[in-house]
Image (cartoon, rainbow, N blue to C red):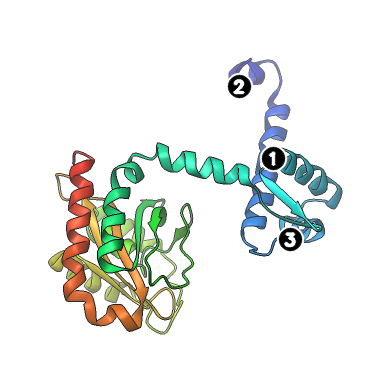
């Protein structure tokens, strides 16, 4: 029986209850993901607003399916999600096409390399290759970030059609993450003009203190943004290497575009 049959047979309430259950399940997983050390059942219930007995029952099911792991009374994400994450990465044509080029770029620069795309006005990281000089960063595959203060975000924003770019900028809440974060729309637009001219963007410790990024956009044949590549690392190493690294990042982005047939 498909969803239309259920609805036609008076099962609207059943469908809505199922949607609520799914939402609660994902809420539990998101809560566990947000805490590196894991959470107790009581903490998850408090953070999600789910009654403790219901949360405990759902966590028991998720743990049994391998999506949560219970250790010493604390819940963390389980290996089932690693399996799904690996499968999602393999299924993503962008990640499949780009991974070998990210590895080449990471080897040449010794820094961490990201591949990202835009979804609903935010940056979503679809692949990441750690460098030998890796620094602690908040970026993880599947996680999202702000578009206006990340290198990959600005690289893509600069090469969107003007109407789409302005719609995204108009909807931004320009939160200040560091003293370097651009929080004025007019200044952001000026920054994007520079990005379009030189074909790379810089995140000068604007999202995370001490983390410097150089990014370039993967463009389609019309010159529009599809994705972006960045080299990210410690400000100490990268600030003085922009001139040397920017061409490598642009070249990596071009190779990915070619591999995608753009």
Residue at horizontal 44%, vertical 75%? 208
* 109 displayed left or right of 32: left
First in sequence: mark 2 or mark 1?
2
Residue at horizontal 60%, vertical 21%? 3
Measured from the top left, where is residue 217 in percent x and y? 24, 57
Dots 1 and 3: beta carbons under 8 Å?
no
Residue at horizontal 18%, vertical 41%? 262
Residue at horizontal 42%, vertical 54%? 124
Distance from the alpha carbon under mark 2 to that under mark 1: 15 Å
* 257 displayed left or right of 209: left
Distance from the alpha carbon under mark 1 to that under mark 3: 22 Å
Helix or strand or loop: what does disc 3 sit on?
Answer: strand
The crowd level at tag 1 (other Cα within 10 Å; few <14, some 14-19, many 20+) is few
Distance from the alpha carbon under mark 2 to that under mark 3: 35 Å
The quadrant where residue 128 appears: bottom left
Which residue extends farthest right? 53
Measured from the top left, where is residue 207 in percent x and y? 42, 73
Residue corresponding to mark 1: 20
First in sequence: mark 2 or mark 3?
2
The crowd level at tag 3 (other Cα within 10 Å; few <14, some 14-19, many 20+) is many
Q: Mark on residue 3?
A: 2
**Foreground disc of the pair 2, 3:** 3
- Tell me if residue 165 can be seen: no
Residue 208 versus residue 19 in the image, above or below: below
The crowd level at tag 2 (other Cα within 10 Å; few <14, some 14-19, many 20+) is few
Residue corresponding to mark 3: 39
* 5 displayed left or right of 184: right
First in sequence: mark 1 or mark 3?
1
The quadrant where residue 123 appears: bottom left
Residue 72 versus residue 207 in the image, above or below: above
Return the residue nearer the eye: 116 or 54: 116
């Amino acid at each position: 029986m498909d969803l239309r049959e259920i609805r036609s047979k008076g099962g609207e309430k059943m469908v809505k209850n199922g949607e609520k259950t799914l939402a609660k399940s994902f809420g539990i997983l998101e809560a566990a993901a947000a805490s590196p050390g894991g959470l107790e059942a009581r903490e998850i219930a408090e953070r999600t607003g789910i009654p403790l007995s219901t949360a405990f029952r759902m966590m028991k099911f998720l743990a049994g399916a391998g999506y949560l792991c219970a250790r010493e009374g604390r819940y963390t994400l389980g290996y089932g999600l690693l399996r799904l994450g690996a499968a999602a990465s393999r299924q993503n044509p962008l990640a499949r096409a780009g991974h070998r080029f990210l590895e080449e770029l990471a080897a040449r620069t010794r820094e961490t390399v990201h591949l990202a795309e835009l979804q609903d006005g935010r940056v979503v990281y679809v692949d990441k290759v750690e460098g030998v000089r890796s620094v602690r960063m908040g970026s993880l595959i599947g996680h999202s970030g702000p578009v206006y203060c990340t290198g990959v975000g600005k690289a893509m924003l600069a090469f969107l059609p003007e109407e789409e770019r302005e719609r995204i900028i108009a909807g931004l809440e320009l939160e200040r993450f560091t003293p370097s974060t651009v929080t004025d729309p007019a200044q952001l637009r000026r920054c994007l003009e520079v990005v379009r001219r030189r074909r790379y963007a810089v995140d000068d410790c604007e999202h995370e203190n001490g983390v410097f990024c150089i990014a370039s956009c993967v463009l389609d044949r019309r010159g529009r943004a599809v994705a972006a590549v960045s080299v990210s690392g410690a400000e100490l190493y990268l600030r003085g290497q922009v001139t040397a690294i920017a061409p490598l990042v642009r070249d990596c982005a071009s190779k990915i575009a070619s591999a995608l047939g753009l």
